[in-house]
Amino acid sequence: MPDETTTPDHSGAPAPGESRRGHARVRGVRLRLSRRALLLALAGGGAVAGTTAFARGTGRAAGTAPAAPPAAPAPPGSRVDNLLARLTLDEKVSLLHGAPDPASLGQAGHVPGVPRLGIPPLRLADGPAGIRVRRTATALPAPVMLAAAFDPGLARAYGRVLGREGRALGQDVLLAPMVNLIRTPYAGRNFETFSEDPLLSADLVAELVRGVQAEGLVATVKHFALNNQERDRDSVDVRADDQTAHETELRGFEAAVAAGAGAVMAAYNKVGGIHAAENADLLTAVLRERWGFDGWVMSDWDAVHTTAGALTAGLDMEMPGGARYGAPLREAVRDGRIPEAAVDRAVRRVLSVRDRLGLLDEAPAPRPERDAASGARLALRVATAGATLLRNERAALPLTGAAARSLAVIGPTAAVPFVSGGGSAHVVPDAAASPLDTLRTRAGAGVTHATGEDLFGRRLPPLAPALDLDGVGVAAGAAWSRTATLTTAEADEWTFLVHYSGTRPTVTLDGTDLFPVRQGVAEYFAGGLLAAAPDGLAVRRTTLRLAAGDHTLAVTAHGGADGQLFRLRAVSGADRAADLAEAVRHARAAEAVVLFAYEDATEGQDRTSLALPGHQEALIEAVTAVNPRTTVVLNTSSAVTMGWLDRTAAVLQMYYPGQEGAAATTAVLFGDADPGGRLTQTFPATEDRHPTAGDPRRYPGRDGIEEYSEGVHTGHRWYEKEGVAPLFPFGHGLSYTTFAYEDLTAGPARGDAGGVDVTFTVRNTGPRAGVDVAQVYLGPSPDLTARGIDQPRSLLAGYRRLELAAGERRRVTVHLTSRTLSSWSGAAAGFVLGTGRRRLRVGRSAADPGLVAAVEVRSS
């Protein structure tokens, strides 16, 4: 191996030779059924020139915006010019909105083509972690697990798998990646995005975009912008000042634009009182004028509220239908209320991207065959690289000796693999082994299993009259209805579950509907684990307390066009007590325990607690009480609180690990692989000690308005500013070996005026090979402080993932770009370099004291 390695430029700028949201308020994002360039250079210490209404916070709506600049003209006589000249108005309008697909592949959206001119249709598929169509696909680990690897190169490989599979499965546009920051641990889609940190998110999204589009699939970065929660996502009005927006949430979008993203998806929420899909400050002033975006902007699904307003603001395509961009747009042009040139501009943007990626070629490149084996290999690689060991007392892991031969495996997600989160990110793979199966294969007959908590219910107790509801078939076109009495011997907590293959049966208990139709996406998105039984039937559940006595149960089901199968099941408090007792018996009899715990997040709803759901905490406490050699494996979307932490031997964070999650988990537990992940989000110690706790204006908003009043102090920056100790800091993660840092130096970077190169040595001081993620943190600029510009006390300025053999030492250089060393100035309406003497720290997390040095930052 070479003696010195240099990190890539962490600015989010494209690699050589590649194409590529002060005191003012950011104005003008909403969400329902979501389906989904220029980096301005810093010249020395000067500011980036130019300002926008978005930056000034005027909340410029489309109707008051000046005409948006035309898309960059295509060369004379180009294919796009020729097509535009030949398209009729009706045809142009048809290219700007979705419509039903007569040959649907089960994807999220479809835009018809124009056969007479050889313009093919577009198919758009969800795909943060795999292509979501009617067929099976490679289920990759959730993006939050990819991010835990701190490896932009791996993100590009991840993107290439998505791109190839999307093309192979008949798709043209990927409704991903999502780059909204993890701002609150409650957000239901944290697993779909990367990080709480702007730099890390920007690096990863840029490489993922490059990977997707290298395969000929259009990448759609979403949700633009300031869309960091699911609660009230259709209506919440987000307020952030310009510095906060540009330094935090917008940085990832800017990096995606610089990487050449073909499409941007406007979010549902409002920003400064204006919906994102019709916000000229967002879609024109920032996205096109400041960043030079030359692709097209589509709406999130059903997120368009006006026709002329949205089109003038810079929204090019309405999805999934044409309520605003269909007949209303066509009529507005014919009546003279909207110039046809505005339609031409939007069509040009769409066609230009399609042309760039070969989607208008007369003889398009043949679609590749799906390479499931290659996808599975990458899924395993990512799940292993992102596995994050949070705790490991007395070297409980890796499992060796007696612990590897006598192992109690506990928890429902040990036997039912937790592959994907819920909502539009959910993917059904070709196959996914359970952790229980892979552990038995690895450890042999010494592995036992106890469920611990029943997720899918068991047969109902005897009913009167006798009635078996554990597998009722209803013929096509038929209706089925029964009434019976359920008798309970004592007051107890019951969970009722209905499993069904068609229209959900109506079930009432004492006249109350147990499974009512939910509002909005909650009816469709109920989780990635809990929403379906192991055999694929849809599942809904409800928990309530029943008094002792007789209860009237009534069930009505319809066969529909195809007939259906349904089951009605339940879990009582007595059942839970029996499951817990069984888990304790297994734990007491084994040398060691691996306990799988879960949290099932989904699009459309935020979490209501950071604690593990259900009765899992009681399960952990009971098991650790009889066997302290317990490792808890977490399949969760985001941070969880751990009042039980000190009772465990080890905690392994595996997020939603995709189809190869069981193999990766087993490899890490037994030491076949070093846990390579590090936290990309801070885990708070308690519910009331994190950046959005205790202030409803920050989350979930008050009177419909949400304020990003934490400013630039997002994520780990807030913990340092406030002096709050987290449960686990950003960047934390343990290895099975140890590392030492030595000989830190820093100085001006070559070829980047104002940039800094940080060089140090990393030694593997342990007995085995392992993974380290060296992190460089930067203190504030005294010169910017003197100018009244707020800065984080410490920000992530660079990082390097290293794999070192036992005893190996490596000299590493991490480049800190001038952009990373800069802050947004309201007075200059742009970024200014933070000059002066600045503190550097190199360590293994945001809280690691590490090595410290100072560097003088100069403009040249």
Image: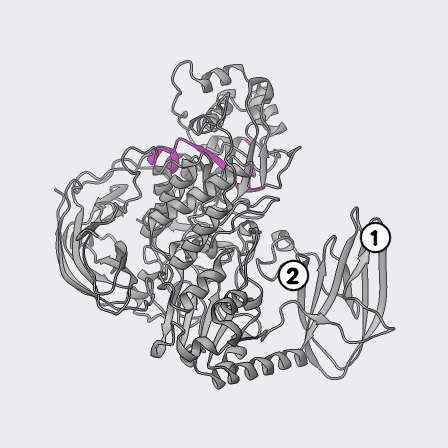
Q: CA distance from mark 1 to mark 2?
A: 21 Å
Q: Residue at x 67, y 32 (%)?
A: 102
Q: Residue at x 42, y 63 (%)?
A: 692
Left or right: 613, with 846 as reference point:
right
Residue on which the image places disc 1: 475
Please state the extent of the stretch shown in magenta in the rendering: 285-307
Question: Toward the viewer: 756 or 210?
Answer: 210
Q: Which residue type carries mark 2?
A: Ala
Q: Residue furthest front?
A: 444
Q: Amino acid at mark 1?
A: Ala
Query: Disc 2 designates what residue?
Result: 533
Q: How many marks?
A: 2
- The quarter of the picture where residue 81 lies is top left
- As helix, strand or loop, the secondary structure at mark 2 comes to loop
Q: In which quadrant of the rendered view does residue 264 lie?
A: top left
Instruction: Please say if 146 is above or below 411.
Output: above
Q: Position of residue 639 (x, y in %)?
A: 44, 65
Q: Do the numbered discs 1 and 2 sit on residues whose CB atoms are within 8 Å? A: no
Is residue 724 shown left or right of residue 540?
A: left
Q: Earlier in the sequence, mark 1 or mark 2?
A: 1
Q: Position of residue 788 (x, y in %)?
A: 22, 53
Instruction: Tell me if mark 1 has few (under 14), some (14-19) or many (20+) residues whose alpha carbon lies within 10 angstroms of its own.
Output: some
Position of the C terminus, as image quadrant, is: top left
- In x, y percent, where is residue 406? 48, 79
Q: Residue at x 37, y 59 (%)?
A: 680
Give left or right: position of 766 versus 490: left
Q: x, y (%) of residue 625?
A: 48, 85
Relative to 392, is 266 above or below? above
* Residue 287 appears in the figure: yes
Q: Which of the two residues, 333 or 491, is positioned nearer the viewer here?
A: 491
Task: Please tell me whether residue 296 belongs to the stretch shown in magenta.
Answer: yes
